[in-house]
């Protein structure tokens, strides 16, 4: 076959091949998980910050509190839940432990707990009364466990991650179904002057293993993320989808003066339409729309 015949044959074969059609399908976008959809549908939730610092008149305790100072005289978790229910709430989250390290349940891992208080003769368990009250009224129970612990001596060492996971296990195996687990990114110094390197993948995996239907809240997810900052400033617009490369599950907090999404840090609170990971957040009004963006 001469060159001219070869080229003609090749052109005929090429023309006979069907052209590959370019896909008109838009790139896949982030979609909520079943647990995130349930969280959206639940709409109103209430956070209850109660603990030993309630009796020291401080927002953040420092871990040196005397457990005996915790002694509520008329604690009635059922009244809390009924009040929340009358306001339209469907779930509540309780500070099982805040930064002071004081545990509202009788943890076997510390003496800085209700078991060493005067309340109910050291036999009380606020977490038990709270979760029982939620279920009696048909509301979901959620728990906040502060990673920062200003009382625990092992804080600032690898051993603290073991301690923290053990506390998660106590809470997530001893009180029935939990609908929401709250973390935050606070990471100050412990009693030894050290800061902790949190093992977030291990913490998240512990929740998934023990309470697979619970959503996890932290500064940037993995299920529900913080919007704005403690001054109430949030990005606008605010999308549930985020880029996990730019916004890891423990993203830095938005500066208090932030009012837009012009940087990657502020973008953690704004998300974007084309992002591939869904992390729920409330709308700018402080509520969540029925159809989340």
Image: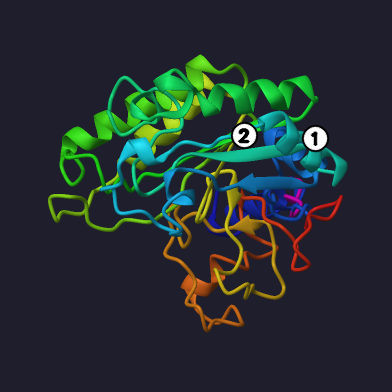
How crowded pointer 2 is (Cα within 10 Å; few <14, some 14-19, many 20+) is rated as few
Q: Is residue 220 above or below residue 157?
A: below
The spot of residue 176 in percent (x, y) is 60, 16
The answer to whether residue 213 is seen in the rendering is no
How crowded pointer 1 is (Cα within 10 Å; few <14, some 14-19, many 20+) is rated as some
Q: Is residue 53 above or below residue 104?
A: below
Q: Identify the residue shown where x is 37% and y is 49%.
A: 99
Q: Quadrant of the C terminus?
A: bottom right
| In the foreground, 99 or 236 | 99
Q: Identify the residue shown where x is 87% and y is 41%.
A: 86
Of labels 1 and 2, earlier in sequence is 2
In the shown orientation, is residue 98 left or right of residue 215? left
Q: Secondary structure at mark 1?
A: helix
Q: What residue sits right under mark 1 in the picture?
A: 82
| In the foreground, 186 or 119 | 119
Q: Secondary structure at mark 2?
A: loop
In the shown orientation, is residue 106 left or right of residue 33? left
The Cα–Cα distance between marks 1 and 2, rounded to whole angstroms, is 16 Å
Instruction: Magenta stretch: give its range.
Output: 17-22
Q: Identify the residue shown where x is 46% and y is 62%.
A: 246
Q: What residue sits right under mark 2 in the picture?
A: 74
């Amino acid at each position: 076959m001469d060159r001219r015949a070869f080229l003609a044959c090749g052109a005929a074969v090429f023309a006979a091949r069907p052209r590959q059609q370019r896909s008109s399908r838009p790139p896949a976008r982030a979609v909520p998980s079943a647990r995130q959809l349930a969280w959206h549908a639940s709409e109103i939730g209430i956070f209850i910050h109660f603990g030993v610092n309630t009796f020291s008149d401080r927002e953040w305790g420092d871990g040196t509190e005397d457990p005996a100072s915790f002694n509520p005289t008329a604690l009635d978790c059922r009244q809390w839940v009924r009040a929340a229910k009358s306001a339209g709430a469907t779930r509540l989250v309780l500070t099982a432990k805040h930064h002071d390290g004081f545990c509202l349940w009788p943890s076997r891992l510390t003496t800085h707990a209700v078991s060493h208080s005067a309340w109910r003769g050291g036999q009380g368990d606020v977490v038990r009364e709270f979760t029982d009250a939620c279920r009696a009224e048909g509301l979901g129970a959620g728990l906040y466990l502060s990673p920062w612990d200003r009382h625990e001596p092992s804080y600032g060492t690898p051993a603290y991650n073991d301690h923290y996971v053990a506390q998660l296990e106590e809470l997530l195996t001893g009180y029935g179904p939990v609908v929401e687990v709250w973390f935050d990114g606070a990471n100050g110094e412990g009693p030894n002057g050290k800061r902790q390197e949190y093992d977030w993948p291990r913490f998240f995996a512990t929740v998934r293993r023990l309470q697979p239907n619970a959503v996890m809240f932290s500064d940037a997810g993995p299920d529900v993320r913080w919007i704005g900052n403690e001054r109430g400033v949030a990005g606008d617009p605010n999308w549930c989808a985020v880029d996990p490369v730019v916004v890891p599950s423990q993203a830095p907090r938005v500066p208090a003066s932030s009012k837009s999404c012009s940087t990657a840090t502020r973008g953690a609170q704004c998300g974007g339409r084309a992002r591939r990971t869904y992390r729920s957040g409330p709308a700018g009004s402080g509520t969540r729309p029925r159809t989340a963006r």
